[in-house]
Amino acid sequence: MEYKGFFVLRLILCFVFSILHLVHGDLSYSFPEELNRGAVIGNVAKDLGLELGILSSRKARVDFERNRKSYCEINFNTGDLMTSERIDREILCAKRPSCVLKADLVLENPLELHRVTFHVQDVNDNSPKFRENFIKMEIRESAEKGARFSIEVANDADIGQNAVQQYVIQKNDNFILSLDNKKVELVLENKLDREKQKEVNLLLSAIDGGSPQRSGTVAIHVSVLDANDNAPLFSQPVYKTSLPENSPLDTVVVTVIATDADEGVNGDVTYQFGHASEDDANLFSINSKTGQIKVTGVIDFEEISSFEINVQAKDGLGLTSYANVLIDVTDVNDNAPAIYLKSLSNPIPENVPPGTEVGIINVQDRDSEKSQQVRCSIQQNVPFKLVPSIKNYYSVVTTGKLDREIVSDYNITISATDEGSPPLSSSKTVHLSVADINDNPPVFEEQSYSAYVSENNKAGSTLCSVTAQDPDWRQNGTVIYSLLPGEVNGAPVSSYVSVNGDTGVIHAVRSFDYEQFRSFKVHVMARDNGSPPLSSNVSVSVLISDVNDNYPQILYPTSEGSSFMTELVPKAAHGGSLVSKVIAVDADSGQNAWLSYHIVKSTDPGLFTIGLHSGEIRTQRDISESDSMKQNLIVAVKDNGQPPLSATCAMYLLISDNLAEVPELKDISYEENNSKLTSYLIIALVCVSTFFLTFIIIILGVRFCRRRKPRLLFDGTVAIPGAYLPPNYADVDCTGTLRSSYNYDAYLTTGSRTSDFKFINSFYSFKPSFLFFPCQEHCQYIFLNLKCLR
Ligand SMILES: *[C@@H]1O[C@H](CO)[C@@H](O)[C@H](O)[C@H]1NC(C)=O
Ligand SMILES: *[C@@H]1O[C@H](CO)[C@@H](O)[C@H](O)[C@H]1NC(C)=O
Ligand SMILES: *[C@@H]1O[C@H](CO)[C@@H](O)[C@H](O)[C@H]1NC(C)=O
């Protein structure tokens, strides 16, 4: 009846508790021990109302307290909670009336914890067992009716109903069984008579209440002796004591004392342990003479917090009695907190915003009470902190921006300290890498680049090289160079230069001509290989320098028809009078276009000089009657380049005041000694020319008469052919160098419609009529008026 009432009460309590658990959103499962591996004990998906997919995506798992091995696992396909190994309640909980395993059901992202309680129910898998198979007793025949003899109880590892419930003794004449307060005693009902029966054999069975029932049996052999005596008697039935864990070996725990009223052998008490598990028996020893119990092993509060040891005292004649020793182990702060890394995102991209959770840690301390309180921190100067989460879980969270280009990996040391005294601490280092994001564009080493190249360079020659740096990782930091599209003088830049995509070296695609252009600008882009790529660009100025590659060009006197270009020198010219001027230009610039004039050969070396830089030909002294009428000069024009280039021309001068002498001019250039041959040639030429002229005049006369339209015979003036004028007219300077542009400007700006201007027009035209024009004064006038117009 008592048992039944207790059972009902327990049922009600259980019911109330499970309702409470549900209310708190916690899970509670109850299942028998010794299930096969993989047995289903519940369905967490159903119980938590979660969809099946969520279990795996949120890494659902069951963490047992103290990070013990896992007894259960979750089947993500069905949501079933299954045992992952056989669970033996007797190993886990020994004699404790309720065997409860506590665990956390952990879901990540976000972290969510559910308390899970597993009640392991007992199964009747152990039989009652006596310590020995055979008990020997000696009882005096003088023992009175009603005398009691203790028998050691049988042990059953199971609990509750499954533990020993009753004892049964084989039917016999002398003894009955007495069960009182869990003490088993043989009670003498009929006095023994040694003369009738020297020994009595009995069978005692212990039976448990499980289903099916199990039982254990001991044989009791009673020798009937002639006399009577007393059993030893313990000073107290239960010895209670406490023992700090980690007590050194041989520490005395307690001393038990039993006394026996008898004398001699009958009063000699020896002690030994009664029922004890093997583990317990190895931790303590009892001195059989003194009853002193000592420590012989390592006492660990975290393993076993209390011991209950049965002690037997036995006198010389084999009478025994029993007492219990209860040892409470007290906790000492001997366990440092343990830090477990539960999850970690590694590597983390460098662009995660501050406050991103990168990992979860769990801290546990096996000690109890204060020694179990743990504080956790990150000490170093790293951009991470710990945010306390549920219970003793912490999130590792970034506190600032990360930059892989500055710090690419972190060793985060997490330390945990408990509040025991003295406190214990431990630390754990978590290695975290930062993954690259393409967040840096390539940067050129210089703001802009200039390349200097001499004109007439070879196509393909190197001009310069540009370099850009990108600190990103691998392809995010790989720089590729290219030309930005653009135009130079109307042509695409790619027809001028090219850039090597890998090295940034810029090559000329063609040969440059300083006389065409002196500089141009291109833009080079550096792009990395990320996706999307980042780029920057830089301007590269290509500056072309001049090379002395143009010969001076003599505009006057022209080389064609040179034999006809003749200057008249008045006979009365004084020393220093300007006679003529050599006009030359050079398409180069600077020193390469700085011209100097020299007379290299002359009929009368003392008569004429030429201005070194002006090219003006002057008489050196007064003309005298004795001077030859025909004078010719060979003038060299030389530029100042390295090496210098030069050109020569011939100038024919006629000292005469009279145009009538002109026909003789043709002879001027000829040497006296071969005049006979040349005379013939000249006569022939004059004849042909005269004939030709006459013919033309006749034809023109005829046409003129018919149309009656007045027309100037050789009126159309021909401008100086473009070929004479180099392309860089626009750049006129006053460096004292006489350049083509100098002259050209002079022509264009002599704006008044004077005869001089007209003259100059005809002066450079190629008309036979002009060649014989007496131009001395005009020439002088024009030349003196040449001036720099800028
Ligand atoms: C982190 O620790 C590892 C191993 O101890 C070491 O090789 C590495 O250099 C450390 N990194 C930093 C950033 O301290
Ligand atoms: C480059 O950057 C992108 C994002 O910008 C990233 O996804 C990729 O992993 C990076 N590559 C490397 C090699 O780190
Ligand atoms: C070149 O760089 C400048 C700034 O440095 C930028 O404004 C421009 O858009 C870039 N051009 C190209 C074609 O990328």
Image: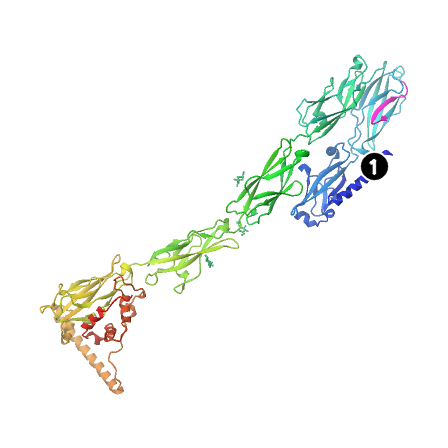
Tell me where the magenta segment starts and ends, as one range. 179-191
In the rendered view, does 495 fall on the left or right side of 148?
left
Q: Residue 158, position in %: x, y? A: 78, 32
Along the viewing direction, whichever of 550 and 436 lies nearer the viewer: 436
Can you say which quadrant of the picture contains the N terminus? top right
Residue 343 visible in rendering:
no
Q: Is the magenta stretch mostly helix, strand or loop?
A: strand
Q: Residue 84, position in %: x, y? A: 70, 40
Q: Residue 687, position in %: x, y? A: 17, 77
In the rendered view, does 188 fall on the left or right side of 644?
right
| Coloring applied to the structure | rainbow
| Residue 45 among those drawn in magenta | no
Along the viewing direction, whichever of 786 and 74 lies nearer the viewer: 786
Count of marks, rendered view: 1
Q: What element carries label 1?
A: helix
Extreme residue toward the left, this view = 626
Can you say which quadrant of the picture contains the C terminus? bottom left
Label 1 crowd bin: few (<14), some (14–19), many (20+), radius 10 Å: some
The image quadrant that residue 582 belongs to is: bottom left
Q: Which amino acid does label 1 sit on?
A: Phe
Q: Is residue 32 placed above or below 618 in the rendered structure?
A: above
Residue 98 visible in rendering:
yes
Q: Is residue 294 placed above or below 48 in the rendered structure?
A: above
Residue at x 21% of width, y 71% of height: 781
Q: Does the residue labelled 1 lie within 8 Å of ligand 1?
A: no
Residue at x 79% of width, y 13% of height: 265
In the rendered view, does 714 fall on the left or right side of 45?
left
Residue under numbered circle 1: 7
Along the viewing direction, whichever of 135 and 317 lies nearer the viewer: 317
The image quadrant that residue 634 belongs to is: bottom left
Q: Residue 501, position in %: x, y? A: 44, 54
